[in-house]
Amino acid sequence: MIHQSLIYGNKFGSPRMREVWTEKALVQRWLDVEAAVAWAQGELGIIPKRTAREIVRHCDVGTVKPASIARYHNKTGHVIVSLVKAFRDAAPDVGELFHFGPTTQDILDTGLTLQIRDALRLLVPALSRLQETLNRQAWRYRDTVMAGRTEGQIAAPITLGHKLAVLASELSDHLARLAQTSERLMWVTLFGATGVQSSFSYIADQRTAKKLLRLVARRLGLQVPTICLHHRTDRFAELGCVLAGILSTLGEAGLEIRDLQRSEVGEVAEPWSADQHSSSTMPQKQNPEMSEWLEGLAKLGRGYAMSLLDIQQQHERDISRLPPELHAIPNLFLHTIAAVESANSVLAGLRVFKDRMRENLLLNGGLIMSEAFMLLLAKESRRKVWAHQLCHDIAMEAARSRRPIIDLLAGNRDVARYLSPRQIRDACDPMNYIGTAVSQVEDTVALCRRRGKASEKILRGMLGTAAVRSGQRKRRAAKRSA
């Protein structure tokens, strides 16, 4: 796969995230589920405790190797049957009581859930670091005035911090969604062939079958559902949509940086080192390649999410779910962490050119201040429709003649009836027309930090404490250094 490439690998994932989705990790998580089942059956007297202990001891990918499973799979065509046979070969004394009662989907679903938890333990701290980078940069540039643009055209002044705070608020929502989604993901699945626990009830009884479910969930650190989840592929589709949403947000941010880095705009730029190159033939190029790459990953993410949304199972379950789940979910995690870490690098080292921002504010003779002037004239004259038409006519004349709009305003007799030269001058200064931008940034950064704590509380419960606390420590260190 491309994410395992020596050249491109880290563009599509990270080394630690790749480890979560290796075949060895996949098989180990299946064996972890089987070990939990055997241990619980030993505790409940369904199988002898000594047998249970031996099964648990042999549930290791170093003992039951993927290659052994693959050899059987070439003959049987069924992956968990092949796992069972490979385990029996590795532990013949106890192998006959391995996989006693579960169905294939129990192992696949719960194993996948454990891998997702491993992946989230890497992704959540990375997201939290990016969130704090955005919070810090939004605060730093909260009063750095630049041109706001709508429909690709200069519109009215904003601040760079405001632009970044909007992105921070969006990422904060994604973190909250991920926390909420995790509550619907971290479930054990152990219900047998058609989901009614008939196999477990038959080899023991109904009460013991429910106890077995609780014990397995406790050992694996998962929640206990009230009903079988084999048919509930919606929870994986929800996860896919959240990850695709994160990718789309970062992809859009990447395109924004690319546009603002254009030679004709030149307001911000990616970090750059002396050893970097952007073209094999044009030595001068400094391309925003990291930012553009984010949108490329987002396109893939949206496709993977759609494949998870499009799963349509027949009756209690079928195998049509497996190709999208086995392919889409690992790639979504790999692409998301690659995008998050890359975006953090770009945004933390963003080069900001304030002089160029100032030049662009005054581009086209200061037409960016037309709205401000129109409102001031309407306020003084009490004639908003008239003021809008007058300012429109003056703005069109300024555009045609390429004269500064302040000169045309100062020389207009209708304007002079209501406004003094100083009022005209002040109304044409972009620094006087950023509204509540600064306070919006300050309020949003505070909100994002509060919401981050709330999301982390949920995630600690779902994923375990250590990984999330690691992200908290790194964020606190970042805040102290800022």
Image (cartoon, rainbow, N blue to C red):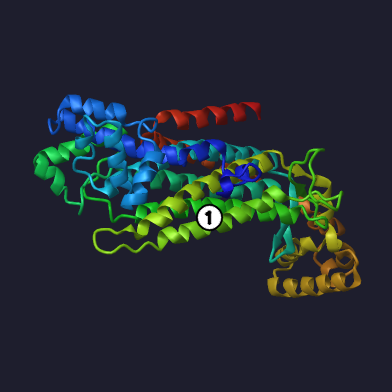
**Which residue is painted at 46% across and 52% down in the image?**
327
Q: In x, y percent, where is residue 442? A: 60, 41
Answer whether residue 261 is visible to the viewer in this image: yes
Q: Amino acid at mark 1?
A: Gly
* Picture quadrant of residue 26: top left
Q: Is residue 1 left or right of residue 47?
A: right
- Location of residue 335 in the rendering, given as x and y in whole percent from the top left corner: 55, 48
Q: Quadrant of the C terminus?
A: top right
In this view, 320 is above or below 391: above
Task: Identify the image quadrant of residue 155.
Answer: bottom right
Q: Residue at x 12, y 30 (%)?
A: 45
Q: Nearer the viewer, residue 45 or 350?
A: 45
Q: Nearer the viewer, residue 182 or 305?
A: 305
Residue at x 21% of width, y 31% of height: 94
Q: Which residue is mark 1?
A: 301
Q: Position of residue 61 (x, y in %)?
A: 38, 33
Image location (x, y in percent) of residue 325: 41, 53
Could you say whether the residue bearing mark 1 is in a helix, strand or loop?
helix
Q: Nearer the viewer, residue 433 or 297?
A: 297
Q: Is residue 221 visible?
A: no
Q: Quadrant of residue 44?
A: top left
Q: Residues within 10 Å of mark 1 (few under 14, many from 20)?
A: many
Q: In the figure, is residue 22 to the left or right of 57?
A: right
